Amino acid sequence: MGSKMNGQFSRRNFLRGAGAAASIGMLSYADLAFSDMAMAAGDVITSSDAASSDLAHDEVYWRSIAAQYDVTADIANLENGYWGIMARPVQAVYRQMNEMVNRDNTFYERANDSRDEDRIMVRLADFLGVMPDELMMTRGATESLQLLIGGYNKLSPGDGVLYADLDYPAMKNAMRWLQKARGVEVINIDLPEPASREGFIGAYREAFDAHPHIKLVLLTHLNNLTGTIHPIAEIAGLARERGIDIILDAAHSVGQVALEIAGLGCDFIGINLHKWVGAPIGSGLIYIRRGRVPDIDPAMDATPPSDNIHNLVHTGTSNFAGRLSIPAALEFHESIGAANKEARLRYLRTLWVDAVREVDNIEILTPDDPTMYAALTSFRIRGRVTTADNNAIAARLRDEFGILTVRRTGPAKGDCVRVTPSIYNSPDDVLKLADALRVIAG
Ligand SMILES: Cc1ncc(COP(=O)(O)O)c(C=O)c1O
């Protein structure tokens, strides 16, 4: 299990640290981004004491949040699964940091960058409930997960590795690549539809028992195809009993649902900050539980010690402005509150799902178990399972009804259409979708 944060790195201490640094003339740009954000957002984000479940349908509150986003009026955007729109105050910080980086050039970088990076890592560790030396910044979950899958060095020829139909396509390819690279047998399972906790846990148990040579499994926390949240802690327990390592794809769950990643029981995790945390595009993370870094190959020019997580990737010249804006994105996210955001997203999802329940040829691909869905939920019109069918449905929703969704390919039972509201969407947006679906499915 990953180590939990100790009090030393609580957010309050981070802020106190920033103040202390400022008073002795050491205020870093990471701190400035943070306090600019507080100023920019201070009078517009009203935190609420209401329970998340009550706040979820407080339209006055959510309109005040939506007002912090500039969103195209050309379409009702229900395709927020690709990346997240930055809130306006976060964009303001990003713009400022970009101007600073371009004005100060290496005068900034040579003097401040590593100190800023250290402070951002402390902030991120606090956010995720882990230690700073368990995290490394990347350009996104693809980079994180490909580094973990490609670099995992405990496989021997003849070992088994496992992935499922609902994993992300690029990561399935990476798992298949291991056959050539490490001489392993690649095993692929289809997860049951309709989805259920027991069904998912049972599918992994069966695969682990049928293939005792499995040493590594790729799991996805909240999959991008149907939107189902997988029972990771339970599957991780089964894996641990059998000595199987897990690489977890948490690209969609961090920020979409409130969680402490250490509680998932996975030692290697790939994370996105540009989907649901609202950081600039190009922001991702690798988490590796303390003590496990040597199990991932270092970059070719890494220098000892081998347990330094920063040895895993050599990005070279980075998007400094993007990184410096991460604290602002976290501040905006936490001003709303992770649990409140999750509750609102689930409310919007359930509004449209409930509104099409009586349409009997629409299949909803996330179950109603509230532990198994958040914003993202796909549907299929019964019998329409090809890519062409589902491209046509998404095109009709866009062209005839002004609603943006996307076709997804990957579930064993066929293609589907993915619907992903974000916190700036209104109930009207999702109810408009339900009306359109009644027409299309009818
Ligand atoms: C489940 C999942 N994993 C990984 C990724 C890759 O994320 P990125 O393209 O931001 O690197 C995505 C992107 O949509 C995803 O949905």
Image (tube, rainbow, N blue to C red):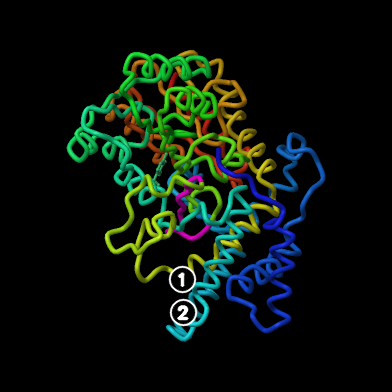
- From the viewer's side, name the closer residue of 148 and 31: 148
- Residue 179 visible? The answer is yes
- Judged from this view, the residue extending furthest toward the front is 305
Residue 294 relative to residue 389: left or right: right
Residue 276 relative to residue 218: left or right: right
Q: Measure the alpha-carbon separation of dots 2 and 1.
A: 8 Å
Residue 159 relative to residue 196: left or right: left
Say what amino acid the circle numbered 1 marks: Phe
Q: Residue at horizontal 66%, vertical 72%?
A: 36
Residue 171 in the image: above or below residue 413? below
Q: Which residues are magenta?
A: 279-289
Q: Could you tell which of marks 2 and 1 lies nearer the N-terminus? A: 2
In the picture, which quadrant includes the N terminus? top right
Q: Quadrant of residue 158?
A: top left
- Residue 402 visible? The answer is no
Residue 92 relative to residue 315: left or right: right
Badges 2 and 1: C-beta atoms under 8 Å apart? yes
Tag 2 secondary structure: helix
Is the residue marked by circle 2 packed among few (<14), some (14-19), or many (20+) residues within 10 Å?
some
Q: Residue at horizontal 54%, vertical 44%?
A: 254
The residue that disc 1 covers is 320
The residue that disc 2 covers is 109
Q: Which mark is residue 145?
A: none
Mark in the foreground, 2 or 1? 2
Residue 328's x, y, as percent? 61, 63
Taking the magenta stretch, the answer to whether it contains residue 332 is: no
Tag 1 secondary structure: helix
Residue 406's x, y, as percent? 39, 38
In the picture, which quadrant includes the C terminus? top left
